[in-house]
Image: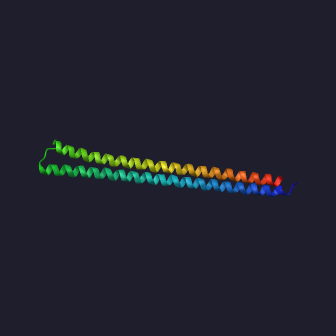
């Protein structure tokens, strides 16, 4: 038995163990990114609820003010004010939705980078081991 075979076997076992730890670390990083995504979704929903609440309060305040002045609820100016308030709220909600889409896409890119880094590292480790074995055999 050539003397380098036990060394090559030991190197292979160590690389295999290293690979297991790399996969485990990548899985934990992916789980962390999933938790980050869940937290961002929760924050986005809280923003939306806050915007709806503010919109509701603004509309109620406008209605109360009009009713104390004796203005008709069918008044074109009152309806225009209410429509503009709803349009502003709608734009704010759309902006929040776009922001959430950007955050989600960014996390998807981060997860993809974790996978690519893991695969590159594992492939590089196997290639290094093969090259070391080839050098020992030569």
* Colouring method of the image: rainbow
Quadrant assignment for the N terminus? bottom right
Q: Name, please, the residue furthest toward the left.
A: 70
Seen at 57% across and 51% down, the residue is: 113
Count of numbered circles in the view: 0
Residue 63 percent coordinates (x, y)? 19, 49
Q: Residue at x 16, y 49 (%)?
A: 66
| Percent position of residue 54, x then y | 29, 53
**Residue 49, position as x, y percentages in the image:** 34, 51
Q: Residue at x 60, y 54 (%)?
A: 26
When asked about the image quadrant of residue 18, the answer is bottom right
Depth order, front residue of 129/69: 129
Looking at the picture, how far across and down is residue 99, in whole percent? 41, 50
- The quarter of the picture where residue 21 lies is bottom right
For this view, does 88 lie left or right of residue 71?
Answer: right
Residue under the point 79% across and 53% down: 133
Query: In the visual, does 105 lie left or right of 19?
Result: left
């Amino acid at each position: 038995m050539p003397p380098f075979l036990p060394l090559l076997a030991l190197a292979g076992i160590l690389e295999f163990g290293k690979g297991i730890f790399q996969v485990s670390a990548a899985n934990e990083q992916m789980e962390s990114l999933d938790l980050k995504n869940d937290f961002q979704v929760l924050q986005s929903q809280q923003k939306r609820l806050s915007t709806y609440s503010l919109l509701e309060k603004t509309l109620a305040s406008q209605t109360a003010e009009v009713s104390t002045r004796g203005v008709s609820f069918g008044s074109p100016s009152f309806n225009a004010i209410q429509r503009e308030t709803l349009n502003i709220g709608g734009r704010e909600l759309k902006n929040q939705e776009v922001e959430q889409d950007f955050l989600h896409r960014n996390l998807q890119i981060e997860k993809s980078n974790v996978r690519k880094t893991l695969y590159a590292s594992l492939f590089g480790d196997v290639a290094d081991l093969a090259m070391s074995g080839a050098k020992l055999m030569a």
